[in-house]
Image (spheres, grey):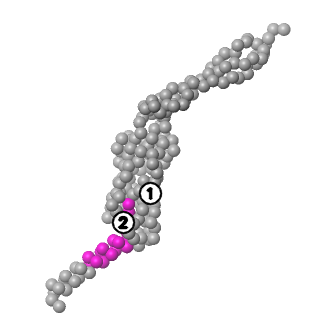
């Protein structure tokens, strides 16, 4: 066998071994685990799935990128690594979000995977829906109709719509209740 033929056979062997090793170790893809997340119901959870093999350890890196979110909206680290151990096919990345009181529309950020063992699905977006629709209720106010003795009074309280999108305000902005106002100190 000539040296060039031997070299060709060895190269083919190496290509097959490398391809087989990649197939056995698999590729990691990112999958969104649920739809929009209200900012008061976080965290946002991303699922990672190892496909096309499960042998050996595989590590991928991830980065969180603001699309319409601002840096304070996401709490904690914005990058890191996830290692799949031999046989492991699923992992999650949990991203803590800040439940602020700012009036804002829904916001979006992206997770991006990188590394030698990533599959076709390398990124996906997450939407944080603003939960700040109403201001807090104001205090109960109302005067008693008598100056002494047993009676009832009607108290009211109000709140305002603080949503950027006013159509989200579908609940009442006013509330009332009837309470006792038994005043002492009546003249005899």
Name the residue tied to disc 2.
27
Q: Which residue: 26% across, 78% down?
A: 14
Find residue 52 and report its image quarter.
bottom left
Q: For residue 47, which numbered disc appears in the image?
A: 1
Residue 188 visible at all: yes
Which residue is drawn at the image coordinates 48% and 42% (left, top)?
38
Identify which residue, 68 or 84, lies in the foreground.
68
Magenta-colored span:
14-29
Q: Position of residue 23 (x, y in %)?
A: 35, 72
Closest to the observer, 88 or 78: 88
Give the answer, above or below, for where 69 lies relative to 158: below
At x 42%, y 31%, the residue is 164
Image location of residue 132, percent across then percent down: 48, 34
The answer to whether residue 139 is seen in the rendering is no
Q: Residue furthest right?
A: 188
Dot 2 surroundings within 10 Å: few (below 14), some, or many (20 or more)? many
Distance from Cα at disc 2 to Cα at disc 1? 14 Å
């Amino acid at each position: 066998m000539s040296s060039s033929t031997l070299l060709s056979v060895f190269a083919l062997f190496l290509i097959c071994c490398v391809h087989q090793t990649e197939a056995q170790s698999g590729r990691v893809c990112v999958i969104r685990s649920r739809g929009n997340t209200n900012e008061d119901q976080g965290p946002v959870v991303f699922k990672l799935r190892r496909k096309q093999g499960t042998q050996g350890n595989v590590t991928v890196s991830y980065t969180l990128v603001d699309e319409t979110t601002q840096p304070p909206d996401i709490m904690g680290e914005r990058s890191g690594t996830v290692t799949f151990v031999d046989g492991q096919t699923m992992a999650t990345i949990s991203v803590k979000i800040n439940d602020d009181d700012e009036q804002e529309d829904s916001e979006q950020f992206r997770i991006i995977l990188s590394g030698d063992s990533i599959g076709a699905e390398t990124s996906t977006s997450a939407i944080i829906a603003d939960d700040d629709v109403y201001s807090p209720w104001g205090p109960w106010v109302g005067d008693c109709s008598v100056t002494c003795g047993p009676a009832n009074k009607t108290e009211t309280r109000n709140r305002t719509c603080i949503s950027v999108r006013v159509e989200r305000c579908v609940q009442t902005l006013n509330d009332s209740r009837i309470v006792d106002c038994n005043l002492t100190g009546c003249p005899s």
